[in-house]
Image (tube, rainbow, N blue to C red):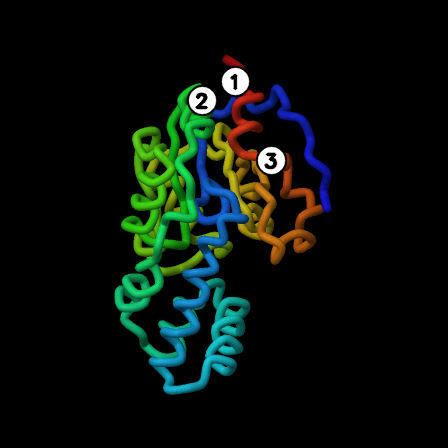
Amino acid sequence: MTEIDPPQPDLDHVEVWVFDLDNTLYPADCNLFDQIDRKMGEFIGDLLTIDPVEAKTIQKQYFRRHGTTLRGLMVEHGLDPSRFLDYVHDIDLTPVPPSPDLDRALGRLEGRKLVFTNGSVPHAERVMDRLGIAHHFEAVFDIVASDYIPKPDPQPYRKFVDQFGVDPNAAAMFEDIPRNLAPAAALGMTTVWVPGNPNWVDQDADDDHIHHVADDLAAWLTALKPA
């Protein structure tokens, strides 16, 4: 695993701060995504009338093959995506504690702040409200805005920078999944991996597209812009 590096002065050039949502703006050890993961399996089981073990196998196959389980269901079963998103994001947010530290850290950052997620806008808004940080963000670019084409496909990254007028060379992107940072780096963004999800400890974490590692997002951002 890549060891954490100290914040570097080269982030002084950043004018736009781009954050993934799940397991990035809140710690992975909240296990919030476990609820979503479980509901995905339930949805597939009901949709295809199969047992939970087979449903979980298909869920993971679609994720690997298509980038998200949703994309797999759309491509292979013609699913209406709104049905899936409404179901899997109907979760209990109480495991996510409000984060005054992250609120303060984001407040110190000069420049625009955007969320770029494979989830939905309503889910992102609920999570950010729970964290107490929604007021910092200009907008959420979600899976609907990306035409249901998920990260790490390069197409939604290009659409994102075009839609919001982002200069990639003056942007930093934060993500918990290392492979999702590769297209951002290719565009010229500074990338920051936020580890914590054990599924992504080793995968692509040592590649050149990872510029920085932030084990604790709020502390890392605070160190960039001390009070």
* SS for dot 3: loop
What's the mark number on residue 214? 3
Q: Amino acid at mark 2?
A: Leu
Q: Are marks 1 and 2 in contact (CB under 8 Å)?
A: yes
Q: Is residue 79 above or below residue 132?
A: below
Q: Where is residue 32 drawn, in percent x and y?
A: 45, 53
Q: Amino acid at mark 3?
A: Ala
What's the mark number on residue 225? 1
Q: Is residue 123 above or below residue 136?
A: below
Q: Amino acid at mark 1?
A: Lys
Q: Where is residue 21 drawn, in percent x and y?
A: 43, 45
Question: Crowding near pointer 2: few (<14 within 10 Å), some, many (20+)?
Answer: some
Q: Please say whether residue 227 is visible from this viewpoint.
A: yes
Report whether 206 appears left or right of 65. Answer: right
* SS for dot 1: loop
> Going from the N terminus, do you reach mark 1 or mark 2 first?
2
Query: In terms of depth relative to the viewer, which is nearer, 80 or 47?
Result: 47
Q: CA distance from mark 2 to mark 3?
A: 16 Å
Q: Please say whether residue 183 is visible from this viewpoint.
A: no
Query: In terms of depth relative to the viewer, which is nearer, 6 or 128?
Result: 128
Q: Are marks 3 and 1 in contact (CB under 8 Å)?
A: no
Q: CA distance from mark 1 to mark 2?
A: 7 Å
**Residue highlighted by disc 2:** 109
Query: In terms of depth relative to the viewer, which is nearer, 77 or 53?
Result: 53
